């Protein structure tokens, strides 16, 4: 009976008169452009597709997945050059996919082994407990003093340890080094990181994706890749003409990454932009009209970090087989003798032992005779510029020497080296993920984006969430949220049942 009313007239049979109900939008008449085929773009596209809209995904690279990139070589375990772990596993909805898809995993939450330049410091490093206590204090401090000025983690922990009456001198010296373990998670150094927005991963468990993270990309992308014409690879979006006028169309100009001279224009009714934060900082895409002021201000108030990974495969295992991770803390400045000047006045060459590193034992984690060393900016940029494998090996060799369980033995042969190059990559925004540095305020951008409930220009990506920020599951959630805002703008009802994960 929907759309009809019954009227009775005297001595007459009831007559059917059509009611003037609002015309329901046919979703298949609408096209949404999605810029970027990373996890957020793919999730946005999939949600929109499941609601019946046409979706056109434009991706600059020749592959999907963005900052999820699994390197697969015959006979070798999957190696994740980008994201490798599911974080916040107790709340992370993507964890459901691990059992649903029957994926192999490893919780690498065993006690790490700690090292200093003096050698193995064992698995008890009391200064680390002081660092943990500092993180707890910093969280409490900004909760109870919300207007207090932001300070770098480095500055704040030095004051904290100076004023702490109940710790030893050694702990006072080493706690600022121990706190640097978090650099690997936040993607930036503690002398730049904000203590106000410090994300300190003390209690959460992390799940390593042994089968490769691209399994999650494939699951997310299945509707899109199975729909001919929905994904266009090698399309570098250069400019976006947008308008919130309901009758206006949105158009974007792309150049082909394999042939700069060839360009294409794509047209749609709405758009979701998912390019990394760093692409905005470098103005790699132009907007006409320019981005709204609140978005511009939000972008200026957020920073971008750089985590690098270097994989070294050896002919034999020379490191401890009992620990998931090896954490190296450089000597505190107060103890180091400073840079040694040579007789010609030049400084001694930089050494890996001047930096905090977290090395993942891929023997336990991925059944491979490999170590994955993780570094952060500014070291990431330096290492990612090293193209010569011999140079790379020599730079990291002092760390390997420290990690030997039998220090008198020569190191075994290196059989393979692979290094990341995110900081050289414009499509990654010359970095890896968003990071809160001193003085930043992530809420400006997030509030501006979430407030666009009725706009044809939407944004998604790891930088647009507080929960899961910088992570795959955070990016995934922002893709879904952007799709919901598009549905709202176009007048299509969101149906939760269409998009369940588990
Ligand atoms: C080294 C490294 C380690 C990480 N480790 C983890 C981890 O262990 N766990 C975790 O949860 N997260 C991790 N992350 C973060 C995680 O990978 C990201 O948060 C997430 O993948 C980001 O997804 P996204 O969709 O926001 O962006 P992206 O994946 O970057 O997608 C954006 C897409 O836009 C495309 N693009 C860019 N510019 C243009 C253009 N002009 N035109 C068209 N397309 C364009 C890009 O090619 C890309 O495909 C890591 C990241 C890196 C780099």
Image: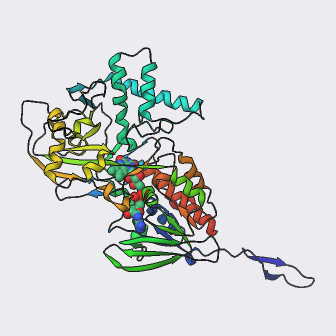
Task: Give me the residue at 56% from left, 54% from top.
Answer: 297
Q: Which residue lies furthest to the right in this view?
A: 10
Quadrant holding the N terminus: bottom right
Instruction: Please tell me in which quarter of the rendered image ligand 1 is found.
Output: bottom left
Q: Say left or right for 71 vs 192.
A: left
In front of the other: 106 or 388: 388
Task: Give me the residue at 61% from left, 60% from top.
Answer: 452
Q: Position of residue 195 (x, y in %)?
A: 47, 35
Dividing the picture into quadrants, the one containing residue 424 is bottom left
Task: Give me the residue at 36% from left, 49% from top.
Answer: 306
Q: Is residue 278 above or below residue 201?
A: below
Q: Residue furthest bottom?
A: 12
In front of the other: 382 or 368: 382
Dividing the picture into quadrants, the one containing residue 3 is bottom right
Q: In this view, does 465 lie above or below 226?
A: above
Q: Is residue 193 visible?
A: yes
In front of the other: 366 or 277: 277
Q: Which colour scheme is used?
A: rainbow
Dividing the picture into quadrants, the one containing residue 456 is bottom right
Q: Position of residue 149 (x, y in %)?
A: 55, 35
């Amino acid at each position: 009976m929907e759309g009809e009313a019954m009227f009775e007239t005297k001595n007459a049979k009831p007559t059917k008169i059509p009611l003037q109900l609002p015309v329901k939008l046919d979703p298949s008449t609408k096209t949404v452009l999605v810029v970027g085929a990373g996890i957020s773009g793919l999730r946005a596209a999939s949600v929109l597709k499941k609601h019946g809209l046409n979706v056109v995904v434009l991706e600059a690279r020749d592959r999907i997945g963005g900052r999820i990139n699994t390197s697969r070589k015959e006979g070798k375990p999957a190696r994740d050059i980008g994201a490798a772990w599911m974080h916040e596993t107790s709340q992370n909805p993507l964890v459901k996919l691990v059992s649903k898809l029957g994926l192999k995993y490893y919780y690498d939450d065993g006690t790490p082994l700690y090292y200093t330049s003096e050698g193995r410091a064992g698995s008890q490093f009391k200064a680390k407990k002081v660092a943990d206590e500092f993180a707890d204090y910093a969280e409490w401090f900004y909760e109870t003093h919300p207007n207090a000025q932001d300070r770098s983690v480095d500055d704040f922990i030095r004051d904290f340890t100076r004023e702490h009456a109940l710790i030893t001198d050694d702990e006072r010296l080493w706690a600022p080094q121990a706190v640097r373990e978090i650099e690997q998670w936040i993607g930036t150094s503690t002398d730049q990181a904000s203590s106000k927005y410090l994300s300190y991963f003390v209690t959460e468990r992390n799940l390593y994706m042994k089968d490769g993270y691209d399994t999650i990309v494939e699951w997310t992308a299945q509707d899109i890749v199975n729909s001919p014409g929905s994904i266009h690879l090698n399309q570098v979006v250069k400019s976006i003409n947008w308008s919130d006028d309901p009758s206006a169309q949105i158009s974007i100009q792309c150049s082909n990454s394999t042939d700069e001279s060839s360009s294409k224009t794509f047209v749609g009714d709405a758009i979701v932009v998912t390019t990394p934060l760093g692409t905005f900082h470098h103005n790699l895409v132009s907007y006409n009209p320019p981005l709204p002021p609140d978005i511009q201000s939000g972008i200026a108030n957020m920073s971008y970090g750089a985590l690098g990974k270097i994989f070294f495969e050896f002919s034999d295992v020379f490191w401890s087989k009992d620990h998931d991770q090896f954490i190296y803390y450089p000597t505190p400045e107060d103890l180091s003798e400073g840079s040694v000047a040579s007789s010609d006045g030049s400084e001694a060459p930089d050494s890996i032992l001047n930096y905090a590193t977290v090395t993942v034992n891929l023997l336990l984690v991925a059944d491979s005779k490999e170590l994955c060393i993780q570094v952060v900016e500014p070291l990431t940029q330096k290492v990612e510029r090293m193209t010569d494998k011999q140079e790379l090996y020599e730079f990291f060799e002092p760390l390997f020497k420290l990690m030997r369980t039998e220090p008198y033995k020569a190191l075994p042969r290196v059989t393979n080296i692979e290094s990341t190059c995110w900081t050289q990559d414009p499509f990654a925004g010359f970095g890896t993920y968003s990071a809160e540095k001193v003085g930043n305020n992530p809420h400006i951008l997030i509030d501006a984006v979430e407030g666009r409930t009725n706009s044809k220009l939407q944004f998604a990506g790891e930088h647009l969430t507080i929960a899961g920020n910088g992570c795959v599951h955070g990016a995934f959630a922002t893709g879904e949220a952007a799709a919901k805002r598009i549905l709202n703008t176009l007048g299509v009802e969101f149906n939760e049942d269409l998009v369940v994960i588990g």
